[in-house]
Image (cartoon, helix red, strand yellow):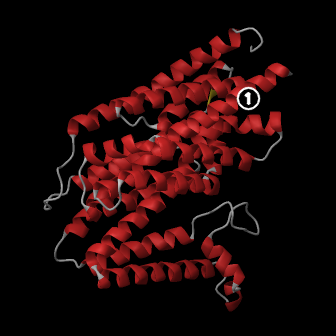
Amino acid sequence: MSSVIGIVSVALVASLFMSFTVGANSNSAPIAPAVGANALSTLRGALLVGLVAGLGAIAQGGSISETIGHGLVTGVTITPLAATATLLTAATLITIGNSRGYPIPSAFTVTGAAIGAGVALGGGFAVVTYARILGFWFAIPVVEGVLAYGLAWLLLDETVSDTLSIPLLAGGVGYTLANVQLSFLPAPQSEQGSIAGVITRQFNVASIGLGEAGTVLVGVVLGLLTLAVVYWQLRRDVRTGINRMLVALALVVVFTSGGSQVGLATGPLEAVFESSLGLPSLYLLALGGLGILLGGWFRSPRLIQAVAREYASLGPKRSIAAFIPAFLVAQAAIALGYPISFNKVMISSIVGAGLVGGSSDSAGVSTTKTVYTVGAWVGSMVGGAVISFALYHTLAALPGLG
């Protein structure tokens, strides 16, 4: 029994280490365009990354954690030893990437490591799940790049007024946020609720004959309010309004990144919390949120600088164009329960927006840096699986652990 407690303790420490690493790595990428556009300083950006991503981890992290913990291998339940092998492998590889200035994709690394440890445990391959996740991953660069390019082209078009295009985009983001599912909001038949849903029930909007359309109506109203606030800001001062819009979007995307990334640190321990500790997953998400907060505060400035300056130098408008597709894709991943790499999400958007010409504030896209990063993505997943497989067998062979 004491050996089981010891292994669970090591797994918890490994999860905290992994969440710290995620906070320093993946959650730093969303704030980078705002820093690159000089709307935020690097240190202030790192502070906000920790606070907002930690909140997002608790509010939206459950679905990704469930997939990592239960959906990647079949026929077995992940043990504390397998969870430890998964988390130690992934966190070590990501830390090495951090030290070299290359943001390693946490989703690829953790997914590979979880599969490697699960197979070493005797589990089978969840082929259907892999196909869905891989399809989503392959679609990300295309969808992100096209959307970011199109939005950047629109925002940089001098024939389209900033007081028209930017408020419209803000209204769309506001509508989406109103319908995002959050763990701390009540819902009658679900564990999570949305802002639009809560307002609909609070004011009994459905009673006027709209039914489910009442929630849509409330979402539209909240989107229009967001549009109006941004329009008012731009009418007062265009430059200040654009920068405030940029910072607000950055915080929204950082919040989303916390929800999508915490599951990479907590997912391997889902089964452990249920079977060995008998605790609800909210406690596990809180542990991950704490690690993300600390990682964002202490280690993210280096990665923020790397993404902001080395991949593409963006102005404020192109940064807005990069944020919106990243936010939409990440929220779709959370809704589907698919693990994603926020580095991949943000870099795809940054590259797409950075390819649009016609502005003197862009230094373009670093092709060499991008190619090296893609290589790191592929290598991290394959390497994570192999190393985790070997590490599990090594740990299992030690006296008192097997």
Tell me: 66 left or right of 252: right
Taking the spot 76% from the left edge, 38% from the top edge, the residue there is 273
Depth order, front residue of 100/366: 100
Q: Position of residue 110 (x, y in %)?
A: 54, 33
Of residue 376 and residue 122, the one placed in the foreground of this image is 376
**Residue visible at 68% across and 91% down?**
208
Residue 213 in sight: yes
Residue 338, image x, y percentages: 55, 46
Q: Nearer the viewer, residue 294 or 182?
A: 294
Q: Quadrant of the N terminus?
A: top right
Residue 121 position in % (x across, y down):
68, 20
Question: Image quarter for residue 190?
Answer: bottom right
Badge 1: how crowded within 10 Å, few (<14), some, or many (20+)?
Answer: some
Q: Is residue 264 above or below residue 320?
A: above
The answer to whether residue 198 is left or right of residue 279 is: left
Element on which disc 1 rests: helix
Residue 71 visible? The answer is no
Figure check: 230 above or below 89: below
Instruction: Give left or right: position of 388 versus 31.
Output: right
**In this rendering, is residue 341 above or below 176?**
above
Quadrant of the snapshot with the C terminus: top right
Which residue lies at the image location 46% right of the left edge and 30% below the top edge?
Answer: 95
Label 1 sits on residue: 9
Amino acid found under the numbered disc labelled 1: Ser
